[in-house]
Image (cartoon, rainbow, N blue to C red):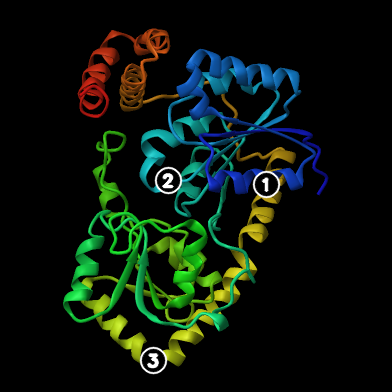
């Protein structure tokens, strides 16, 4: 495809391994790539200098496409609307299961294309007249061929890698242990503690059964007014990572994951603690069946979800949507914001101010004050009151 976009700006929230992988990928695809870690810049230099820095970069480098890897309110909808002009804007959202209806869909009004990791948010964006693409790969998944199970014996019966204290994971893990299952856990709140990212594939390779849980984080002030998210079983990249390791995944059910892997053929699901225990016992005894499932999952993952392969596909889909005049896209100068969104924005500004005080950046604290009143007095009173309570707890002790 003719990639006529020459100067690309990547707006990352911070400098992490995940975003560095994205950056390396895009640098291979385009001649001129520029990056700003906007969240880090914001906390160091404040909102005004962050916005000025981005605007200057856009002007000096003649940026014609902006890819925003979204992480919150640090940059406002008005800011993105102002810098858009003739440039194309692509938003990459990673938590639409939780935040589509509280935050992300409002920012998406500015976008020419949205990339989402939630299969079921595609229809919601399309209903709003916003072209959307499903990003089905896990950027953390190591590339095919980096490790081989031939050299690592399957000496772990059952393992889980992740934050063990999230939601009801401990209940499930303790249930297995009480019933005599040898479970090794890795990560925050686990028996083995923190594990380096590059060591995680070794755990997958050495484990006969790799567990995956799909319940979301408990609601916070960002989405407490959408309590039904407590019923959602979200998309997790972990089954893809496990499959690329040619290992067996036993996952809590998720309709999104069922779209990626066929139950009983490429993955197994459980719906309860009792069923989890039953299937763990079954697949520990049936090694050949377990390994056949892992092999089929590996083939599916390599062909469809391996990082480089899938990233190339997603990028091509983005460029196709940007190249054509999509009659389904709603072009409107109007920006719609709910009362709940405005209140959350004021809460977030209040929390930023609390963090600035904690870090003794008083000048940056004062420059945020006008933003408290951007929606009027009523929204200020409600949002600031709620935000101050949270800031008092987290920053102003």
Judge by depth and name the residue closer to the eye, 250 or 103: 250
Which residue is found at the position 24% from the left and 68% from the top? 173
Query: Residue 330, percent across and down?
Result: 58, 33
Q: Could you classify mark 3 by the number of other residues whose Cα lies within 10 Å: few (under 14), some (14-19), or many (20 or more)?
A: few
Image: 24 above or below 301: above
Relative placement, left or right, of 55 versus 291 is: right
Which residue is found at the position 49% from the left and 75% from the top? 205
- Which numbered dot is residue 95? 2
Query: Residue 232, percent across and down?
Result: 32, 54
Name which quarter of the figure residue 34 lies in. top right
Does residue 76 show up? no
Mark with earlier residue (1, 2): 1
Relative placement, left or right, of 194 versus 262 is: left
Mark 3: secondary structure = loop
Marks 3/2: CA–CA distance? 36 Å
Q: Which residue, as the protein is rendered here, is positioned at the far left? A: 178
Where is mark 1, residue-wise?
A: 24
Image: 140 above or below 152: above
Mark 2: secondary structure = loop
Name which quarter of the figure residue 295 lies in. bottom right
Mark 1 or 2: in front is 1
């Amino acid at each position: 495809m003719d990639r006529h976009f020459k100067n690309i700006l990547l707006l990352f929230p911070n400098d992490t391994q995940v975003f560095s992988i994205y950056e390396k990928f895009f640098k291979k695809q385009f001649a001129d790539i520029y990056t700003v870690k906007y969240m880090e810049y914001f906390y160091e230099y404040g909102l005004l200098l962050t916005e000025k820095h981005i605007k200057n970069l856009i002007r000096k480098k003649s940026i014609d496409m902006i890819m925003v890897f979204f992480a919150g309110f640090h940059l406002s909808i008005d800011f993105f609307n102002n810098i858009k002009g003739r440039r194309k804007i692509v938003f990459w959202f990673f938590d639409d299961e939780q935040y589509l209806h509280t935050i992300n869909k409002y920012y998406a009004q500015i976008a020419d294309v949205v990339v989402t990791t939630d299969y079921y948010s595609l229809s919601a964006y399309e209903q709003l007249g916003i072209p959307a693409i499903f990003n089905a790969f896990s950027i953390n998944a190591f590339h095919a061929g980096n490790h081989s199970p031939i050299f690592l014996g399957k000496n772990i019966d059952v393992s889980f890698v992740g934050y063990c204290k999230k939601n009801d994971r401990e209940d499930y893990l303790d249930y297995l242990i009480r019933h005599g299952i040898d479970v090794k856990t890795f990560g925050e709140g686990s028996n083995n503690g923190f594990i380096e990212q590059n060591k995680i594939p070794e755990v997958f390779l050495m484990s006969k059964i790799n567990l995956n849980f799909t319940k979301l984080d408990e609601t916070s002030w960002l989405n407490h007014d959408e309590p039904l998210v407590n019923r959602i079983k979200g998309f997790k990249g972990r089954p893809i990572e496990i499959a690329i390791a040619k290992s067996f995944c036993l996952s809590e059910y998720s309709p999104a994951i069922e779209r990626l892997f066929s139950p009983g053929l490429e993955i197994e699901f459980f719906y309860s603690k009792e069923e989890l225990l039953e299937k763990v016992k079954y697949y520990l005894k049936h090694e050949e069946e377990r390994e056949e499932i892992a092999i089929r999952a590996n083939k599916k993952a390599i062909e469809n979800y391996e990082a480089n392969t899938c990233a190339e596909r997603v990028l091509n889909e983005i460029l196709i949507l940007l190249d054509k005049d999509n009659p389904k896209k709603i072009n409107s100068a109007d920006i719609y914001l709910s009362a709940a969104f405005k209140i959350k924005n004021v809460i977030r500004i209040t929390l930023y101010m609390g963090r600035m005080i904690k870090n003794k950046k008083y000048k940056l604290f004062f420059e945020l004050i006008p933003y408290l009143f951007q929606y009027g007095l009523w929204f200020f009173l409600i949002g600031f009151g709620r935000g101050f309570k949270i800031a008092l707890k987290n920053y102003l002790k």
